[in-house]
Amino acid sequence: MATEIGVTAGDVVIVGGVGFIGLGAVANALYRNATVIVLGRHEYRMDLCRQMGVHAIINPDDDDWLDQLQRFTGNRRGADAAFECSGAPY
């Protein structure tokens, strides 16, 4: 997944929909030393993400989720790569 997109160390990756496929995307991006931001709300899965070393978790139900993403990424104003793994639009 991340290999095909070309994720490398220093990239910012956002993952939406953290089920078993999303967790795979998270693990893959972390393995490549990317900065990983997760869009999620399921507390058990977010705890798994924290244990894995995710850099930020943003609740997509927050009205300012996009502002949070842009604040976290600073001058980049977003992610280098995104994986939408839930099938639901954000």
Image (cartoon, rainbow, N blue to C red):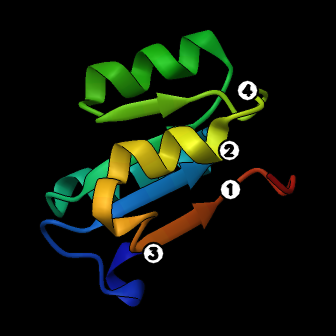
Answer yes or no: is residue 77 visible: yes
Residue behind mark 2: 17
Residue that badge 3 annotates: 1
Residue in the picture at 68% in, 44% down:
17
Depth check, front residue: 19 or 17: 17
Please report whichever mark, 3 or 1, sits nearer to the chain's N-terminal start.
3
Residue type indicated by callout 4: Asp
Distance of label 4 from label 2 (alpha carbons): 15 Å
Q: Nearer the viewer, mark 4 or mark 2?
A: 4
Q: Amino acid at mark 2?
A: Gly
- Whether residue 16 sits left or right of residue 71 in the image: it is right
Q: Foreground residue, 23 or 66? A: 66
Q: Secondary structure at mark 2?
A: loop
**Is label 4 in contact with label 2 (beta carbons under 8 Å)?**
no
Do callouts 2 and 1 mark residues in contact (Cβ within 8 Å)? Answer: yes
State which quarter of the image contains the N terminus.
bottom left
Q: Residue 49 appears at what percent x and percent y?
A: 40, 28
Sequence-first disc among 4 and 2: 2
**Residue identified by numbered label 1:** 85
Q: Position of residue 37 (x, y in %)?
A: 42, 44
Task: Give the amino acid type for the residue marked by disc 3 in the picture.
Answer: Met
Q: Amino acid at mark 1?
A: Cys
**Observer-nearest of 39 and 74:** 74
Q: Residue at 60% of width from left, 11% of height from top? A: 43
Q: Please give the label number shown on residue 5.
A: none
Circle 4 is placed at which residue position? 62
Answer with the quarter of the image where residue 45 lies.
top right
Q: Secondary structure at mark 3?
A: loop
